[in-house]
Amino acid sequence: MTLLSSLALVAALAAGAPMDLDLGSLGRDFHVGHKGWNGLSELKRLADDLGCPMQVRRTLDWSTLDGQDVLLVLHPETELDESAGTAFLSAGGRMIVADDYGKSERLLAKLGIRRATDNWPAGVRFYRPDHSLPVATPVRGTSLGKATGELLANHSAYFLSSLPATYGFAPGAGLVIEAAVGHGRIVAIADPSVFINNMLELPGNREFAAHLIVDICRLQQDRLVLLYGPFAQLGTPPAALLGAPSSDSGHDLPDKLNRSLGGANLHIQQTLKGQGKADDPEVITLLGLLFCVASLLLFLRYLPLPGQPQDSAFAQPTRPPDTGLFASVQRYAGGAGQVTWGFIYPATLIREETLLRLVPYVAQSTDGSPLEPKQVRAALTENVSPLAGELGYKLWKGLSSLRDSQSPSSPAQLLRTQISERKLAEWYKLATELFAELDRKSRV
């Protein structure tokens, strides 16, 4: 189907809601339960079918996010906390930001991305002469850049950045930019309306949405956390995201294979819906193929296979100045970069983050002696609350087992400290509750 015939079909299905209607004109924009032209019911169904279910949240508690949460921020009317956003990404988080109100400008600015709404540069192709429907084409050969040959936007802004665009309207005017931030990944899109029901009737836009979901989510494992319009924010992201991908690209080898088959899964679903005959030979063949592939994925899931970065061409924005936490990670890693020492690595992250949070409340000893759990309890009870005192005491008492590893002379010396998964989970829970209590006190 050509772009012209597709748009004619979409205009007919709009039932009186023309495509050049401003998104602010109706009250159910980006509502996942809304099946009208400007809802997100088709995107939710697509995500659910592909194995990355969508959850809607009206409050973003950064402290409760984990490595299986993929943030999907569409049409935000609340300004994103750029410090929390960059910390979430640096810890291995993944995020899709599609903004037309500019509420993510400060976060994107930290990555070297600037949003523009002024006159279009030369070379932009439009479906309509009123410039309401600009057409973007792929610029980079990433897996997402290979999703479609054309991506149509509606009343879109555009990006100016030194980072290369994956899809662009013209040189210097980007619609989609992919970037790696620390161990995390962000996909920035200058127009959220590419995901509304009306626009997903276009084959190119639907292919883009499907490839984006499969590319950024580990299917049957992760979930899309949708935030749109006005929403509340609180808390601080954990220093270590439990369950985050083991590689910077967001996919290990089994996940890559599963992700690459996402298009096949979508094709199978469409074939079943289109033919509707369970005994059709083509349907039977596809079902058999799907069963074999599922068995292979199950086998690969439990093999200790190494994972290579999925797309080494991801643009790397300028890294922010080293923080105390980053310097600590480098110290524990001995300058070797990514480490694979079981649970000792995230445990040290929790310890350093906890120490940074305690500094404003606990007086440091001048003789160099280590901070004791009883000191933590007394200081937090007096300066914050009895609950904070008990949480801090239990957490710091557990983290004291890492004390002998503060300045290891070699990686082998650090390996003598054994941290179990159960112990790490316990510390993570205590740290999350303590940080929330400290944040509550700071807001009072």
Image (tube, helix red, strand yellow):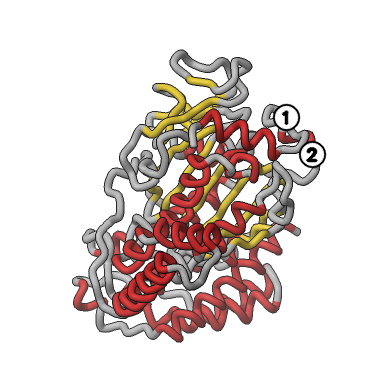
Residue at label 2? 26
Q: CA distance from mark 1 to mark 2?
A: 9 Å
Q: Count residues near mark 2 (Cα–Cα under 10 Å), then give few for <14, some for 14-19, many for 20+.
A: few
Rendered position, 214 above or below 104: below
Quarter of the image with the C terminus in it = bottom right
**Residue 402 relative to residue 160: left or right:** left
Question: Residue at (35%, 47%) from the top-left corner?
Answer: 143
Q: Amino acid at mark 2?
A: Leu
Along the line of sight, which residue is nearer the eye, 261 or 413? 261
Could you say where residue 166 lies in the image, as x and y percent from the top left? 39, 37
Along the line of sight, which residue is nearer the eye, 274 or 152? 274
Question: Residue at (57%, 61%) from the top-left corner?
Answer: 360
Q: Count residues near mark 1 (Cα–Cα under 10 Å), then give few for <14, some for 14-19, many for 20+.
A: some
Residue at label 1? 21
**Residue 370 relative to residue 52: left or right:** left
Could you say where residue 399 lies in the image, as x and y percent from the top left? 44, 79
What is the quadrant of residue 404 in the picture? bottom left
Rendered position, 233 above or below 396: above
Could you say where residue 109 lies in the image, as x and y percent from the top left? 50, 35
Q: Amino acid at mark 1?
A: Leu
Q: Earlier along the polypeptide chain: callout 1 or callout 2?
A: 1
User: Number of marks in the image?
Assistant: 2
Question: Residue at (62%, 45%) from the top-left corner?
Answer: 74
Q: Mark 1 falls on what kind of element?
A: loop
